[in-house]
Image (cartoon, grey):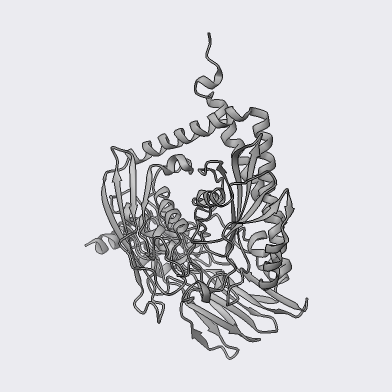
Amino acid sequence: MAASPLQRELDPILMAVLANRLDAIVREMTNTLLKTARSAVLAVVRDFSCSIVTGDNRLLCAAEGAPVHIFGSSLQTQAMCELHPDLAPGDAFLHNDPYLGNTHPADHMYMAPVIVDGVHLFTACAKAHQADCGNSIPSTYHAYAKDIYEEGALIFPCVRVQRDYQDIGDVIRMCRRRIRVPDQWYGDYLASIGSARIGERRLVELVRRYGIETIRKFIEEWFAYSERRAVEAIRKLPGGRYTSVSRYDPQPPTLPDGLPITVHVAIDAAAGRIEVDLTDNADNIACGLNESVACATSNAMCGVFNCIDPEVPHNAGSFTRIAVKLRDGCVTGIPKFPHSCSMATTNIGDRIVNAVQLAFAGIGEGYGNAEGAMGMGAGAAVISGHDWRRDGPYINQEWMIANGGPGTPATDGWLNFGLPVACGVIYRGSVEVDESKFPMLYRRLAVIPGGGGAGRFRGAPGVEVVYGPRRDPMTVVVSCDGQVNAPQGARGGAPGPAAATYKLKPDGSAEKLPGAVVCTLEAGECIRGLDAGGGGYGPPVERDPARVLRDVLERWETPARAQDVYGVVLTGRMEDETLAVDAAATAAARAAMRS
């Protein structure tokens, strides 16, 4: 008797069809949220991520979600299952508790269990960073919060917000009362719930078409395939233990000397396993920089995935081959209540991603990456105030940063990198949209020439941004790391230039601001931010001179740095387009620099 299809491996074509169908469902969820959200941080910047988790709480599909958002999705669905054993079709839950599996309080995760014929097969997840989450200051980031109470955010430890597809009004009324622009929040709530419901609807259709048993078989085989791909990628690496340190900037009075972030990476190539050890770091600190479990784990894994075969799927199958070691009460580990995790998704998280990449670079030539620019400068500040045009309040996180991406063994850094934790997934903002939605005016937005770390493959430059209020005062909250300890280069590459923030006065004077600051801009005043640049990879004198020439022509580099840093001698003039490489003079200059 011939074996039934379910008694042998699924046909590879069917496997590919189902894997891509799941990916398409997550992308449809993403497009739904993007097109219907109210706040600019979601509808323009796309600071949100969607994912699908299995009913037994394993991340199945994340498509184009930001790693820091979705690698820990299963921690939150696990909490949902444990706290709500009575799951039913039509339920939806809001979860933003960083002590219960969420990233940080500003990320509102909406979860819809997908139940078919009484079987909980999936959970559709939509996680959205809020324009405001009720913090004690008008910002979703509070670097100076001594604890969760001073932070002030509304915390929802996986609470039911819909039953039988109808809103439960209690939570909605709480948010509308405490959040500064309630209609904006409510529009984002509807967009997020709608995204999760689209995922639920499409997943039910998928199961109806192929049947529960086929879908279950696919899930297990997809995870097994993903694990095999991870094993293959890890076995290509030299085994060993590698350590790196990335130092967080000083933040007086809590961190007067900054904070070293140490990462140990152990590669067991024969067994196809990697362990990232984050335990060799300071205890929880009395400010908002503490990592949540979700963020510490996700950021460590993100650094690993950045350094292995990019074709390895990112799901629970490949995750089984990457262990992240955490410690109770550690700033990069398991937070001890009530320490604040307000900044968990970003600043120290960026340092973890970068430190893992640098540890891989310690393997040898061709491995790892340099550090990418970290820190949310003035271009990523949270702005708020009163809009006289609408006679009401406004609040939004800007996203006009570029933050230069890191040089790699084979490529230059990416200009619109954003943050290491997001890996370029978040979109750039729009000057036109910001100026139409908010009472503000941009004075300057430009790439910084020479703003990247030099190397055989250079880091990308950052941008300079200048903006301010049109009339009434504007509050600007900046949380910018990388002003003291700039992104490091790798394998002989130069560090990227540091970030900086200034307050510009009407008389033309400039006041240098600290990394984390709450600043009020009056009419005529502006804030000026300089992004850090990514670190370079490999010695600058090994960079192809033609690439240096192109950088100068594009004004990403300066003629002076071309000769002084790269040893590339140019002839001709930019003005009449005769600039060219003097090959003989370049060879002589580089020989002198090497000696």
Front residue (pair 489, 560): 489
Determine whether 392 is above or below 317 in the image: below
Image quadrant where residue 132 sits: bottom right
- In the image, farthest residue toward the left: 595
Residue at 67%, 64% in the rendered image? 40
Residue 289: x %, y % from top left: 44, 69
Determine whether 1 is above or below 335 in the image: above
- In the image, farthest residue toward the front: 86
Front residue (pair 139, 55): 55
Front residue (pair 505, 330): 330
Determine whether 327 is above or below 468 in the image: above
Residue 392: x %, y % from top left: 75, 77
Residue 122: x %, y % from top left: 59, 41
The C terminus: image quadrant: bottom left
Asked if residue 16 can be seen in this view, the reply is yes
- In the image, farthest residue toward the right: 390
Asked if residue 583 can be seen in this view, the reply is no
- In the image, farthest residue toward the top: 1
Q: Is residue 315 left or right of residue 326?
A: right
Q: Is residue 108 left or right of residue 233?
A: right
Residue at 58%, 31% in the rendered image? 215
Determine whether 356 is above or below 529 in the image: above
- In this rendering, the count of numbered labels is 0
